[in-house]
Structures are given as structure tokens and as C-alpha cells.
Amino acid sequence: MMDIKIKNYLGIAGIIVMVAFAYGAIRMANVAEPSVTRSFSVSGEGKVTAIPDIALFSFSILTEGGIDLSSLQEKNTTAANKAIAFVKENGVDAKDITTQGYSINPRYQYSNCGGPFANGGNVCPPPEIVGYTVSQTVQVKIRDFKNIGAIMRGVVSNGANSVSGLSFDMNDRTKLENEVRAKAIAAAEERAKTIAKAGHFRMGKIISINDGGVSVPMPYRTFGLGGADSAMSKTAPTIEPGSQDISASISITYSIK
């Protein structure tokens, strides 16, 4: 009989402990659960108009010939070095001259066997290398705009047979991007104040900011010019950089008081 009472007491005590533990867990869950925060989001756009201060273009030296590859490479290198030397002599620093590519490609002659069952049933002979094409491309960055046309003309008369990819950029782009982001944030904040006033509530703290990125258009002109006797080698083109609109978008979420 005593054993039964002891067991009953132990069972009741266990139930009490379990209930207390469950109650404590519920209280902890309620404390840990964050309160629902009322919020609203706005977006803002910023724009800055800037005048480019850097011009970039590329020139290429293409040399074709027979199977004497060493001779072709030497001829191509001589022409490229002459053009690069001209660019440096006209005030462009070596750090603003970049070799973008150098390639050697074979040229093949194919046999006309007349189809798979022609040539008396014999296998058609493989293509034969009859020459090579050596190509070298150099990019030039120009900071003094009054020299753009003269340099583009000069590289042609000094060995380049292709000029292309003229584009414009800003040297201190980071400063401009920070400026346009600041304008976008200010525009978003002003919009948030207007919404809060119209909705008869007070703005709280910023909960999150989402950067939509900065858009910088890259206007360019493409030239397909070459040869020492071309019009490009006789007349320097007039190059106008114009202006560029740099834009940014920002999304901000505010709490509502």
C-alpha cells in the first residue's frame, strides 16, 4: 500500500515538473518572438550629367603572307612598335597603352575531291597550310582630348591598318557614383516624408536599404579604317565626347511609429 502511494506521489510530481517546463518554454517562445514591425518602402532615383575626360580606342596591325612565319612576325612587330612609339611621342604614357591581343592563324588550301565517292575511291588529302595571318591589337587611353584625332590618324600612317572601338569614360567614376547615390537616397527620403504626411503617420528608423546599382552609358563610335593611303591617314577626324548621364536607384524601408 505504501509503495502505491509513493508511486502516486512521484507521478504527480513528474506531471508538475512537466507542466512547469512547458509553461517556461511557452514564455521563452513569447519573449523570443519579435513583435511585428509596421513598415513601408520607397524608392528614389538620382542623376548626374558628366563630361567624359578619357577617350579609348584600339588599333590593329594585320599582316598576311606565306609560310615564312618568322618573317611575318618580324614585319608585324616592326609595324606595331612603330605605331606604339608614335603614340608615346604624342604624350600618351606607357601605362595607358595596353596590348589586347596577339594571334597567329594559319591559312589553308583545301583539295576539291568532288565528294566522298570521287577521287577514285581514295581518301581526299588533308588541307595544306599555304600561309599565315599575324594580328596584334593595342588599346590606347587618351587624357588630352585635343590629341585624339591626330593620334588616331597617326597610328594609321605609322603601320596600323584598322582603328576601332572609340569610347569615352570618366577617370574618377567612383566619386560620381557616390554623388549620384547620395542624390537617390535624398530623393527616397523626401518621398518617404511626403507619404508619411499624407498617410498621417510618423516615419521611424531605416530598416533596410537596397542599392539598385549605378547605370553609366558608354557611348562609342566604331571606325573601320586603315592603310597608309587611306583618307584617315590624311585627315584627322574631329572627335566630340559630349556628355553622359549617370543614374542610380535606391530602395529604402522605414518603420512606422
Image (cartoon, rainbow, N blue to C red):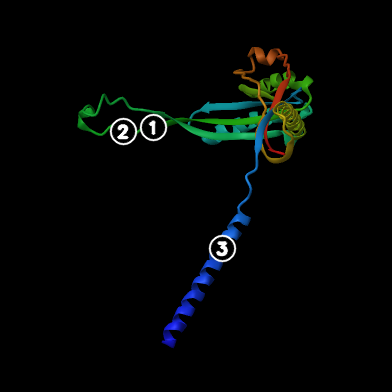
Q: Residue 128: which disc?
A: 1
Q: Which of marks 1 and 3 is nearer the N terminus?
A: 3
Helix, strand or loop under label 2? loop
Q: Residue 23 carries which label?
A: 3
The residue lying at 59 percent from left, 18 percent from top is 224
> Type of residue at label 2?
Pro
Numbered disc 1: secondary structure: strand
- Is residue 43 something that shows in the picture? yes
Report the front residue among 132 and 8: 8
Q: Distance between the residues labelled 2 and 3?
A: 90 Å
Which numbered circle lies on residue 125?
Answer: 2
How many residues crowd mark 3 within 10 Å: few (<14), some (14–19), many (20+)?
few
- Kind of residue indicated by mark 3: Tyr
- For label 1, count other residues whose C-alpha is less than 10 Å away and answer few (under 14), some (14-19) or many (20+): few
Q: Answer few, some or many: residues within 10 Å of disc 2's Cα (few below 14, many 20 plus, some between 14 and 19).
A: few
- The residue that appears at 67% across and 31% down in the rendered structure is 42
* Residue 82 visible in the displayed image: no
The tally of labels here is 3
Residue situated furthest bottom in the rendering: 2
The quadrant of the image that shows the C terminus is: top right
- Circles 1 and 2, Cβ within 8 Å, touching? The answer is yes
Q: Nearer the N terminus, badge 2 or badge 3?
A: 3
Pick whichever, 15 or 139, lies toward us.
15
SS class, disc 3 = helix
